[in-house]
Amino acid sequence: MFHFVRRRMLSSVLPLVAVLLGVFVLARLTGDPASLYLPESATPAQRAAFTERNGFDDSIWQQIADYFGGVFQLDFGESLRTGESAATMALRAFPATLQLAGATMLIAAAGAVVIGSWAAFRPNSLADRIASFLSMTAASVPDFWFAITGVWIFAVGLGALPTSGVSDGMLSWVLPVATLAIRPLGVLTQVVRGAMVSALSAPYVRLARSKGAGSVRVVSHHALRNAAAPALTVAGDLTVSLVNGAVVVETIFGWPGIGKLMIDSITGRDFAVLQAAVLLTAVTIFVLNIVIDVCYALLDARVRETATV
Amino acid sequence: MSSLSDKAADGRPGTGSDAPAAGAEPAAPARDSRVSLWRMLLRDRVATAAAAVLSLVVLTAVFGPLLVGSAATEQDLDNTNQPPFSFDDGWLGILGTDPLGQSVLARLVVAARTTFSVAVPAVALALAVGALVGMWAGYHRGLRETLAMRVADIIMSFPSLLMAVVVLYVFSPSVANLVVVLAITRIPVYLRTARAESTELQSRLFVDAARTFGTSSGAIIRRHVFPIVLPTLLTLATLEFCYVMLAESSLSFLGIGIQPPDVSWGLMVSQGRSYLQTAWWLTFFPGLAIIVTTVSATVLAAWARLATDPAQRWRLTLPRRARRARNAPAPQEAQS
């Protein structure tokens, strides 16, 4: 197992460097920060001083070398806006997104397992059709539209929930989590349903049934365990795309997470913060992928065999 | 000699089982061969409805702007923020008007064209590149496969919306740039699928036979691999169409997609956002248009996946009553 994880980590280093390099080059093409941070009346000398102080006058290769040198010493540069360390800013915003994503995936996964198994238990029944149609619709709702419709109904209309911010305790979580969860819930329900339909028709389930196992036990002990592998793959992909949703949701609800930080630093040409946030996100995604692979191996003996070879 | 010709005669109808899906219609078993895809579609009420809705949306996107003419940009400041379902202002006011007195219906129609003009080329471009590279990588294996998969991993490992945000911030957000960005972020999806299928196919007997006869690898990919991979890729493309449409509307909503003189569904939601308390129809109807189109495409894709899979097709060709009866005890898959 250890060997397996180590090999996965080694093969992840190259994509990480590539992502970082891409963002580094692209970010520098967005324009000259000097024109954004200095007043228009700034003299050429002041501009030159600003550029030199932040190292923007070096060649792009020199800048890249400096930056990667810094990264290896865990120095991610400073924010142009606040002068704070970029790493501090990214790490401060990170827990907010992580909590949001964690709550979302927990709700989506639990809901999908319950609804999906229930729908798969009697394929093509009325309950199955309704569940399938609802999950398809849920997977098709644009998150930004869901968010502002939710604000319109529950915050503006009923006044029950806050429109944005994090100051209202649990209530302020309801709309952001619901918005983020709706798409993963829809997609996962479809996957769980599909996997459960084929698992429930498999010989081992019929054997369990013929031995007198109750339907709850058949679903929870026999079918679900085997249906978990495809659901896990999709759940992993959904978690990656949750970052997409987080950008939209955090912008709408003013959630102080990493998505909002990235949008703000792009519009503010705050390169160092953008790179730190991107690196943090990318590392998280890679760790997540490895965790999923390990879960895979724990679930499926066939994968475990090939992983240890 | 006679036995040989017998075998040849016998062998022909059986080719369907050697290369499922390769012979699409004619090679399918006798019962299925009479049921064309078209009739199979008409038998499934939900899929028919989805196809009808989708065709209507496509027709609207293509011909609709000609019908509504300049109504989408005609300002009428006496008729601002009119609620929907009132006919005072003619049929164009049925979905209400916006703060400039423009008809929401006319704007929806024009926006449909913009939305499609981003989503369709983006999907087509990603499909073409992903399928070509994927089949090539999967057929040749080795270094070429590793290289293609690594690049796909890199693209996939970064959230696509963020990549689009960064790129569109660098290059001005135009329709062409949107298409390219969305296509690049979605190429890995097709690439992985095409590679997986062609890896499996290149070890199959009929591909081996073609290779033995000296067929070039390009011709094998074109004539033996591509026709089998195509149905899967087309189904995938239908689903991807939904994804790209949602991504475009998200970007337009964030202000880095379609830019104001033009109008797309996502942009309409974004523009209506500040009038949420006074004019709900400005955001509601564009959102509904996105949902209806996406759901229809999803339903159609689910149907197409069944219809193009020889092992699953019986589910659609059985009469309705028999289908329900057979589904209940969960039949065994034909594959096992």
Image (cartoon, rainbow, N blue to C red):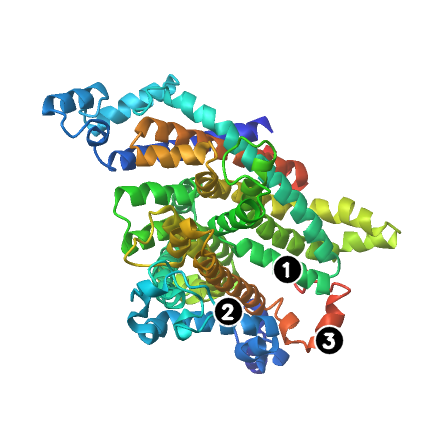
Of the pair A174 and A189, the residue shown nearer to us: A174
Asked which secondary structure carries label 2, the reply is loop
Question: Could you confirm whether marks 3 and 1 are on the same chain?
Answer: no
Q: Residue reaching furthest left?
A: A44
Which dot marks residue A207?
Answer: none
Residue for badge 1: A132
Instruction: Bin the neighbour count of mark 2 within 10 Å (Cα to Cα): few under 14, some 14-19, many 20 and up.
Output: many
User: Which residue is at a point 25% across and 37% down the rendered structure image?
Assistant: A30
Instruction: Bin the neighbour count of mark 3 within 10 Å (Cα to Cα): few under 14, some 14-19, many 20 and up.
Output: few
Please state if B24 lies on the left or on the right of A50 as rendered: right
Q: Amino acid at mark 1?
A: Ser
Marks 3,2: beta carbons within 8 A: no
- Chain under callout 1: A
Q: Disc 2 and disc 1: Cα gap in Å?
A: 30 Å
Q: Disc 3 and disc 2: Cα gap in Å?
A: 28 Å
- Residue B295 in the image: above or below residue A303: below
Q: Amino acid at mark 2?
A: Ala
Question: How many numbered badges does the structure rendering display?
Answer: 3
Residue for badge 2: B22
Which dot marks residue B322?
Answer: 3
Horizontal and vertical percent position of residue B260: 30, 54
Horizontal and vertical percent position of residue B141: 43, 49
- Residue A209 in the image: above or below residue B303: above
Q: Disc 3 and disc 1: Cα gap in Å?
A: 21 Å
Asked which secondary structure carries label 1, the reply is helix
Where on the picture, by quarter, is residue B7? bottom right
